[in-house]
């Protein structure tokens, strides 16, 4: 037997030490986040919560930011567990599990029933330190069930949940949890499309057919115009692609989806003129969500979609919106969506459909309704810029944000290996 496969105790001890150190750092971070939350620190940067600040300024995922905020709150109620976390004996994931005990409803229920939270804290800490992660999950679940053995009054809307996870390759995973009635409605609608699309020789799996049925359900809703309007604009599938990449005489019409109301935005700028910090190469297109797809996908969508020509200038601003001679509100908005891609307030990632078109120079003060005088801002930040904050587009095409005191809001520089 090769001796290199045995031993390694020093390496494993090092791993354990690093895990403990990470636990201690996570504990300090959770406490710092809670202190910032209690002092309303995010308001300084124009944000309403620590979760949004962590997403925009520290590049955390929404899930991780929420967990960190929740851990900071939970540690206040569970001092024994907090002490173990400070010592590096408990992980941030374990604290997140225990945080279920400290929700406002459960704290109120425990107080009403005379439960000694200190005893519960000690039990949770003991399990977290001495047993595997899943054991703590079981203990917390049993405690929550004991607080309310009958469960909540049936309300189907409260039990419905859907999470959306966007992956780096542009694909998306959905996790959908529905009550029995809601699930029956959804599955019936999807199944109708599944059964209507069963060509001879179809070798798709059941899972693939269900996914195709769900997409067709969305296509039908968009094509029929039944979907609610977003900011006064009919919802559309937007694809931004260079005109050279869009032009392809061999358009795969036989494989184009039917019924989708898609709009392909073709821009004709050059790579050197694009102000975005993200590189864009020929042969690619960008969806409205920011996902990058092959240009062939754009051509496929364009087969059954309306095409709007948008010519971008050297600074990335749309110069020509096609045949329209006079910019109307909806054209200004579409141009701003193409240029800005979402809320331009530093640290905010709100999508275009959450945004208003803000006049940089107020209309009452003589500001024109034009693209040059416009910026996309979500409702919260639209209010902020009317209360002292200021946004401005620089010659390089980047947006900057200033606080009422004149200091600029900035996000941290990209992290580099070996730099503390």
Image (tube, rainbow, N blue to C red):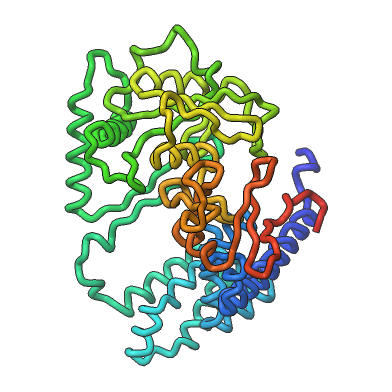
In the rendered image, is residue 132 in sight? no
Q: Residue 127 in the image: state x and y as whole percent.
A: 53, 74
From what the image shows, is residue 85 above or below residue 278?
A: below
* In the image: residue 414, left or right of residue 404: right
Give the x, y percent position of residue 266.
Answer: 49, 24
Please tell me which residue lies in front, 345 or 252: 345
Between 85 and 43, the one lying in front of the other is 43
The residue at 32%/78% (across/down) is 146
**How many numbered discs sit on the rendered protein?**
0
Q: Does 360 sit above or below residue 18?
A: above
Farthest bottom residue in view: 114
The N terminus - image quarter: top right
Residue 363: horizontal and vertical position, in percent?
A: 47, 54
- What is the quadrant of residue 395 in the picture? top right
Q: Quadrant of residue 228?
A: top left
Left or right for 153, reference 206: left
Q: Is residue 116 visible?
A: yes
Q: Residue at x 28, y 63 (%)?
A: 158
Q: Residue furthest top?
A: 249
User: In the depicted view, which residue is nearer to us: 357 or 157?
Assistant: 357
Residue drawn at the location 69% of the way across and 66% of the way down:
406
Q: Position of residue 390 (x, y in %)?
A: 60, 60
Left or right of residue 311: residue 394: right
Where the C terminus falls, by quadrant?
bottom right
Image height of 199 relative to 362, above or below: above
Which residue: 66% across, 60% down? 409
């Amino acid at each position: 037997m090769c001796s290199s496969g045995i031993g390694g105790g020093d390496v494993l001890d090092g791993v354990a030490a690093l895990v403990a150190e990470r636990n201690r750092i996570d504990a300090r971070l959770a406490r710092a986040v809670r202190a910032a939350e209690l002092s309303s620190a995010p308001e300084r940067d124009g944000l309403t919560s620590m979760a949004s600040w962590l997403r925009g300024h520290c590049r955390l995922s929404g899930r991780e930011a929420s967990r960190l905020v929740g851990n900071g709150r939970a540690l206040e109620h569970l001092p024994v567990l907090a002490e173990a976390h400070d010592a590096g004996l408990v992980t941030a994931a374990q604290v997140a599990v225990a945080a279920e005990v400290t929700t406002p409803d459960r704290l109120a229920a425990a107080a009403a029933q005379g439960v000694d939270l200190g005893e519960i804290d000690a039990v949770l800490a003991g399990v977290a330190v001495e047993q595997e992660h899943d054991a703590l999950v079981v203990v917390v679940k049993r405690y929550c069930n004991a607080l309310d053995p009958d469960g909540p009054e049936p309300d189907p809307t409260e039990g419905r949940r859907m999470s959306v996870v966007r992956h780096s390759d542009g694909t998306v995973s959905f996790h959908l949890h529905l009550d029995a009635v809601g699930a029956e409605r959804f599955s019936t609608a999807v199944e109708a499309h599944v059964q209507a699309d069963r060509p001879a020789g179809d070798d798709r799996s059941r899972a693939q057919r269900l996914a195709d049925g769900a997409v067709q359900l969305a296509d039908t809703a968009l094509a029929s115009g039944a979907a609610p309007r977003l900011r006064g604009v009919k919802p559309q599938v937007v694809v931004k692609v260079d005109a050279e990449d869009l032009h392809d005489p061999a358009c795969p019409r036989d494989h184009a989806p039917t019924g989708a109301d898609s709009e392909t935005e073709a821009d004709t700028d050059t790579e050197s003129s694009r102000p975005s910090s993200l590189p864009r190469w020929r042969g690619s297109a960008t969806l409205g969500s920011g996902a990058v797809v092959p240009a062939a996908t754009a051509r496929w969508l364009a087969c059954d979609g309306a095409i709007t020509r948008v010519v971008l200038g050297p600074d990335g601003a749309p110069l020509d919106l096609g045949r329209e001679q006079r910019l109307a509100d909806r054209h200004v908005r579409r141009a701003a969506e193409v240029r800005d891609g979402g809320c331009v307030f530093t640290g905010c990632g709100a999508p275009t459909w959450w945004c208003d078109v803000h006049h940089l120079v107020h209309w009452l003060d003589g500001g024109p309704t034009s693209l040059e005088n416009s910026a996309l801002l979500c409702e919260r930040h639209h209010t902020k810029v009317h209360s002292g904050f200021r946004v401005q587009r620089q010659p390089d095409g980047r947006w900057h944000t200033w606080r009422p005191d004149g200091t600029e809001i900035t996000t941290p520089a990209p992290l580099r290996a070996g730099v503390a």
